[in-house]
Image (cartoon, rainbow, N blue to C red):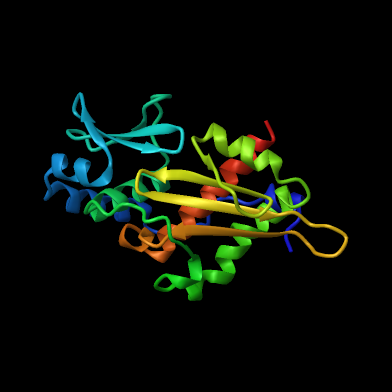
Amino acid sequence: MLTVKDVNRLDLPKQDNYERALAIGLEKFSRKDPGWIAEKAGATICDGNLVTPHLNVNILLNLESKEFTISETGEEAPIWLSILCMHYLNSAEGSKPTGKLKHFREFKDGAFYEPAFNRRTKEILIAVFGQDPSPMIEAGQTLNGKRLDSGDAAIELPYFPFVPITCVVWKGDDEFPPEASVLFDETAGLYFSAEDMAVAAQMAVLELMRRAKR
């Protein structure tokens, strides 16, 4: 089981060929109508940018330069986030969340990645919020999250407009250890592969942790 000390050393898993993955996504995007994509992805087009809401910020894709930036800071978006956004936009066909939640293992290839997924998501939630889940709600609300009535604390994070990620924590007591779940809407597999879902969930959980410590 992770400890808080272990959690502080966690970062995005190293993966190869980020630049190639982004280039492939942009090439696929170039063959589509940006206006159609924006409509189907819950995004907008403004001043030559495709604007995609992400948690409490907006990701701008400049339609001419093909560069990704964070609207609120003007900074270049991290490449992993640019890739996730590109995959989300390229997969968008207008499917909206149904509200039916599923575990990661229930999606295609999810069972294969589940041990790593749990280490980098639910075990972090347990280590950081297992004894006192209330800071998770406060942190989630700063990310435009919506509090849910589940467990001892639950927050639905708007990772992308049609891909919410839900974090649930049950606090520990004298009889039972703390428990947590990271859940996706049943439509998440239409937008993300299991690998994309794992990265998105991990980074969402790490952002909750960082904001809870502010």
Question: Where on the picture, by quarter, is residue 126?
Answer: bottom right
Q: Vertically, is 38 above or below 170?
A: above
Q: Is residue 136 above or below residue 192?
A: above
Position of residue 68 relative to residue 116, above or below, is above
Q: Is residue 15 at all visible to an observer of this figure?
A: no
Residue positioned most to the front: 149
The answer to whether 27 appears left or right of 71 in the picture is left
- Can residue 170 be seen here? The reply is yes
Horizontal side of 40 relative to 193 (left or right) equals left
Q: Identify the image quadrant of residue 3.
A: bottom right
Q: Residue at x 42, y 41 (%)?
A: 78
Query: Along the horizontal axis of the image, is 160 left or right of 50?
Result: right
Which residue is found at the position 63% from the left and 35% from the top?
138
Q: State the quadrant of the N terminus.
A: bottom right
Residue plotted at (41% across, 24% down): 72
Write the residue at 38% across / 24% down: 74
Q: Which image quadrant is residue 212 in? A: top right
Depth check: 200 or 69 in front? Answer: 200
Q: Is residue 209 above or below residue 130?
A: above
Which image quadrant: the C terminus?
A: top right
Residue in front for this viewpoint, 97 or 195: 97
Q: Position of residue 136 (x, y in %)?
A: 65, 42
